[in-house]
């Protein structure tokens, strides 16, 4: 309910045409609050190096498996991979998955969800644009702050070095902005999208949810995950189409209206399915 209400607030804010600087909010969330959330959450984790690698492997595995399952279906129906494959592979593990895992599993769930999102962000800023554009944009990857936040946090965890208290306090304070900003931005983004080709968009939206859940189920079984880690992986893997997929489609002119429809449709379906999914993982 908090996820839905805050996203709905952003949606209504946009519809009411109230002042909202999307460029500033998005830039701040991507470059400041989200990296701080990643860093402050990861350094508080009590997991060992092996568990961190397991969670990262689970995150990558969920996305790759979803893509592998989607590819033959897209080819069979003669649908362009450049348009649909990124949307079916990358879930909204940031502005929807992180809050859901926080409310479901508390601080431990938040840290694990952030770790899942960190691996997702690395792939989404490398493989995502490469699929959409047919090439890899190395400069874009090097400009992604969350990658450096993950690297520094992992070094802190593996070495046992304690960062100064002022660093921890500052990143925690800035990171606390990330979740509400993510949800508000999600609502604002959805308010600005229009659904075209509604039947196909709904079908592809349902496919994203199903593929995500099946991929997550296979990965947690393969890795033998239990408890909170299992729940976080299943929740994150089953999240709807990430808004970033729409931005890549828009940037490279890959039928952005189709991807927008998938974002809208899958988000609505995810909201409806979340109570059942939470019952299944908790």
Image: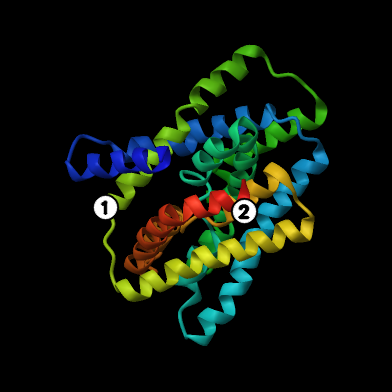
- Residue nearest the observer in this picture, 124 or 107: 107
Mark drawn on residue 234? 2
Res 252 → quadrant = bottom left
Determine the residue positioned at 41% across, 73% down. Answer: 203
Where's the N terminus, which quadrant? top left
Determine the residue positioned at 51% across, 45% down. Answer: 94
Determine the residue positioned at 61% across, 27% down. Answer: 40
- Residue nearest the observer in this picture, 123 or 64: 64
**SS under mark 2:** helix
Task: Quote the CA–CA distance across marks 1 and 2.
Answer: 29 Å
Does residue 85 appear left or right of residue 21 in this picture? Answer: right
Determine the residue positioned at 55% across, 36% down. Answer: 102
The colour scheme used here is: rainbow
Q: Which residue is mark 1?
A: 192
- Residue nearest the observer in this picture, 116 or 105: 105
Mark drawn on residue 11? none
Specify which label sits upstream in the sequence, 1 or 2. Answer: 1
Q: Is residue 81 visible?
A: yes
Badge nearest the viewer, 1 or 2: 2
Res 206 → quadrant = bottom left
**SS under mark 1:** loop
Where's the C terminus, which quadrant? top right
Q: Position of residue 39 (x, y in %)?
A: 62, 31
Q: Position of residue 171 (x, y in %)?
A: 56, 23
Q: Position of residue 264 (x, y in %)?
A: 35, 59
Vertical arrangement, residue 215 with respect to residue 163, above or below: below
Q: Position of residue 224 (x, y in %)?
A: 79, 54
């Amino acid at each position: 309910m908090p996820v839905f209400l805050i996203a709905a607030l952003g949606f209504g804010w946009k519809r009411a045409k109230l002042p909202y600087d999307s460029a500033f909010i998005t830039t701040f969330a991507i470059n400041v609050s989200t990296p701080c959330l990643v860093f402050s959450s990861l350094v508080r984790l009590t997991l060992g190096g092996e568990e961190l690698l397991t969670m990262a492997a689970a995150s990558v595995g969920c996305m790759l498996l979803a893509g592998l399952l989607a590819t033959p279906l897209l080819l069979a129906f003669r649908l362009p991979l450049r348009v649909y494959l990124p949307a079916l592979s990358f879930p909204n593990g940031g502005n929807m998955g992180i809050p859901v895992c926080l409310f479901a599993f508390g601080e431990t769930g938040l840290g694990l969800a952030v770790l899942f999102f960190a691996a997702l962000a690395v792939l989404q800023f490398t493989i995502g644009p490469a699929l959409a554009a047919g090439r890899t944009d190395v400069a874009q990857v090097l400009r992604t702050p969350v990658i450096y936040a993950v690297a520094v946090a992992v070094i802190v965890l593996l070495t046992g070095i304690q960062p100064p208290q002022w660093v921890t306090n500052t990143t925690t304070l800035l990171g606390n902005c990330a979740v509400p900003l993510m949800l508000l931005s999600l609502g604002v983004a959805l308010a600005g999208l229009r659904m075209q080709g509604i039947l196909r968009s709904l079908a592809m939206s349902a496919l994203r949810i199903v593929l995500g859940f099946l991929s997550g189920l296979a990965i947690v079984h393969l890795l033998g995950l239990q408890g909170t880690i299992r729940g976080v992986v299943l929740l994150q893997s089953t999240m709807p189409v990430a808004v970033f997929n729409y931005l890549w489609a828009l940037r490279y002119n890959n039928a952005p209206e189709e991807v927008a429809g998938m974002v809208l449709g899958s988000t609505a379906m995810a909201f409806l399915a979340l109570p059942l999914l939470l019952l299944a993982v908790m």
